[in-house]
Image (spheres, rainbow, N blue to C red):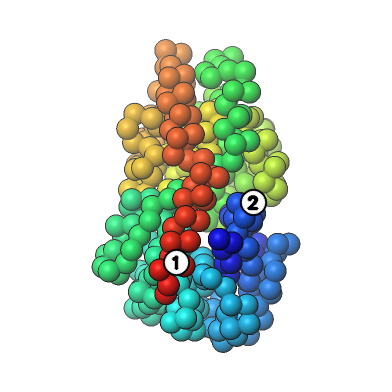
Amino acid sequence: MILKVLMLADGRAVHTVRFQKELARQGVEIVLASLERGPTVDIPLKRLSVSNSLSYFFANRQIKDLVRKMNPDLINPHFASGYGFSVAISRVWKRKPVALHCLGSDILISPKKSIAHKRKVTLALDRADTIFCDSTFIAEQITTLAPSAETNIIPWGVEDEILNLFEKRKKHHIDADRPVRVLIPRPHNKIYNNLFIYESLKNLLEKKRLNLTFPAWGDDLDEFKKATKKERLDGSISLYPFRDRREYIDSLADFDIFLSAALSDSSPASLIEAMAAGLYPVVADIPGIGDWAGHGDAALFDPRDGNTLRAAFEKILDPSFDIKSTLEKNHRLARQKGRFPDNIEKTVKIMKSMVANGP
C-alpha cells in the first residue's frame, strides 16, 4: 500500500524537511503544503493576513479545497496551535483521518496565553484521530487538555550520521589541558535562558576553563551580544551562523558537552543528538527531559539557580570525574530508542493502520 499524505507544516523548519524526506525515502507519497516558504514546499498556501493566528484561520478554506483536489489518504498537520487548528475548523477531518504532530511549546505554552489560545489547541486535539508526541510528559499534558485523545509517544530521533560520530571521536573524556568546549544550540529566546547560562558560568569563563558556543539568532540576540561583548572578544564565547543539516551534524564532533537551560521543553531532539554523538549532557531539570535524562546519565540543574549550574560544571571539571561510561550508556540508549528511520517507520505503520480503519 502506497500511503498518500498531505503534510501541513512550517516549510522553513529543519525538522519539517527531515520528516518529509524520510517519509519519502520510506515509500510514502508526501505532499507538503505551507504558509511559510521553504525549498521543499510542494504547495505554497496564500497568507491572507499579516497576523499568524489569522493566517492559520484563513488557511482553512485552502486546506479544504486542497483535500478535495488531492484526495490524500491522511492529513498530517504540525502543530496543534497552528495547522492543527486550521485542519480542525476546515472540517476535513470528517472526510479523512488526521494524524496531528504536537510540539512542546504548542502544548506547554500556547494554552496558557489566553482562553482563546487554549480553545484553539483543544479543538485541534479533539479533531485529530491520533496524536504523535515525543515524550511521556507531553502525552500527559495532552490528555489533560483533551481526555479522550489517543497519543503515540515517538521521539523525533537522530540520523545514522550522528550515531556514527560516536565511534569517530578520538576521545571520550575531558581534557584538562584545554578549555572544555560547550555547545548551547538553543536560540536566544527567553524560554531558552541563554543569558542565565552566561551569568552562571562567568567566573569559569574568566578562568579560561570553558568555551561556550551559541547560535547567532533569536529574539534576544542583541541583548545577549551586549552582555557578552568582552567574552566574545577574548574568544571564550562564540556565535555560530545558521548551518544546514549536514554542517550541523559535522560540527557536533567539535564539542565535549551539550548544555540546555530551557525553562520549558518537551523531549528535545538536540539532547538526543548530543547523546548519540558522545557529548555529555548538562540539562535543566524539567519534566520534559525525563524520558532521556535524569537517571545518572546527565548533569541536572535548576534553571533558576545559577549556583546549581556552576556546581554541575565544577564537578565535570574535576580531574577525577569519569564520563566515559555515561557517554557509552547514552549512546546505546540513543541507538536503541532514538534512531530517526526506525521512529519514522513506527509512525508510518500507525498512519497506515489509521487509513485502513477510516476517519
Local packing at callout 1 (Cα closer than 10 Å; few below 14, some 14-19, many 20+) is few
Q: Quadrant of the N terminus?
A: bottom right
| Amino acid marked by disc 2 | Arg
Image marks 2 and 1: residues in contact by CB distance under 8 Å: no
**Horizontal arrangement in the rendering, residue 171 relative to residue 117 (left or right):** right
Position in image of residue 356 (x %, y %): 44, 66
| Local secondary structure at mark 1 | helix
| Local secondary structure at mark 2 | helix
Residue shown at 52%/33% (left/top)?
A: 276
**Horizontal arrangement in the rendering, residue 250 relative to residue 263 (left or right):** right
| Amino acid marked by disc 1 | Ala
Position in image of residue 102 (x %, y %): 44, 62
Q: Nearer the viewer, residue 165 or 342?
A: 342
Q: CA distance from mark 2 to mark 1?
A: 22 Å
Q: Nearer the viewer, mark 2 or mark 1?
A: 1
Per the rendering, the mark at residue 356 is 1
Location of residue 15 (image quadrant) = bottom right
Position in image of residue 233 (x %, y %): 69, 37
